[in-house]
């Protein structure tokens, strides 16, 4: 994962980025000439030009050099140098970690899908149990109504229709006689 410097074409482990966006090795940046203060008006400290022949934009060599005392202490940790190192992963540890995390993510997603499948399956089983409980109660109800009807029919057949009619009162006023009870 090491890069090559566009100026010297050498393989380097550490590349640095200039404020203009061009990338060079530390040796090439150190070789750039320091501009005189009369050559640049925008900086009050040492500056150099980008080694790219088309760019040649000035950049501060070390903006914190000498000026750090003018910055309040609480802001000093947030100051960034103009030339910043580009961090690479020469041994591939970041790639391995990303692959491991991808596998963990895939495992968690598969586990989540399995759990959703199990929840749907349990929900379906619960629905079936509810339906079976209702249908199990209905035959019991049908059987009891059927038996009650059979008993009533048997009672009518045994006593006969004429005896049942004689038991029933003819008028409501005659219901209080001793024959009704």
Image (spheres, grey):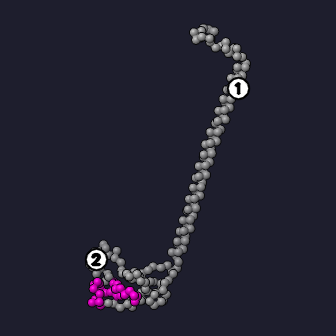
Main SS class of the magenta portion in the image:
loop
Extreme-front residue of the structure: 54
Residue shown at the point (27%, 90%) measured from the top left? 38
Q: Is residue 40 visible?
A: yes
Q: Secondary structure at mark 2?
A: loop
Using the image, determine if residue 113 lies above or below residue 67. above
Q: Residues within 10 Å of mark 1 (few under 14, many from 20)?
A: few
Q: Residue at x 62, y 44 (%)?
A: 129
- Residue 92 vertical position relative to residue 26 in the rendered view, above or below: above
Q: Earlier in the sequence, mark 1 or mark 2?
A: 2
Name the image quarter holding residue 73. Answer: bottom left
Residue contact at pointers 1 and 2, CB within 8 angstroms: no
> Residue 6 at x, y = what percent?
45, 87
Q: Nearer the viewer, residue 3 or 153?
A: 153
- Label count reads 2
- In this picture, which residue range is highlighted in magenta? 36-62
Q: Position of residue 178 (x, y in %)?
A: 61, 8
Q: Nearer the viewer, residue 16 or 91?
A: 16
Horizontal side of 128 relative to 63 (left or right) equals right
Residue 44, image x, y percentages: 27, 84
Residue designated by label 1: 150
Label drawn at residue 159: none
- Residue at image position (58%, 61%) is 110
Q: Quadrant of residue 108?
A: bottom right
Q: Which residue is mark 2?
A: 71
Q: Is residue 11 left or right of residue 42?
A: right
What residue is at 65 percent from the left and 32 percent from the top? 141
Q: Is residue 176 visible?
A: no
Query: x, y (%) of residue 134?
Result: 62, 39
Q: Vertically, is 148 above or below 139?
A: above
Label 1: which secondary element: helix
């Amino acid at each position: 994962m090491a890069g090559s410097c566009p100026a010297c074409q050498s393989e380097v482990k550490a590349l640095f980025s200039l404020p203009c966006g061009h990338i060079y090795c530390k040796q090439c940046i150190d070789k750039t000439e320091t501009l005189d203060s009369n050559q640049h008006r925008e900086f009050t400290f040492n500056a150099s030009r980008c080694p790219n022949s088309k760019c040649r934009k000035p950049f501060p060599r070390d903006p914190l050099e000498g000026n750090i005392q003018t910055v309040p202490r609480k802001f000093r940790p947030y100051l960034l140098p103009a030339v910043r190192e580009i961090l690479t992963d020469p041994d591939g540890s970041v790639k391995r970690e990303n692959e491991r995390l991808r596998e963990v993510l895939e495992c968690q997603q598969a586990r989540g899908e399995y759990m959703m499948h199990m929840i749907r399956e349990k929900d379906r089983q619960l629905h079936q149990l509810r339906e079976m409980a209702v249908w199990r109660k209905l035959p019991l109800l049908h059987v009891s109504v059927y038996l009650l009807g059979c008993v009533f029919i048997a009672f009518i057949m045994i006593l006969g229709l004429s005896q049942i009619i004689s038991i029933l009162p003819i008028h409501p006023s005659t219901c209080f006689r001793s024959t009704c009870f």
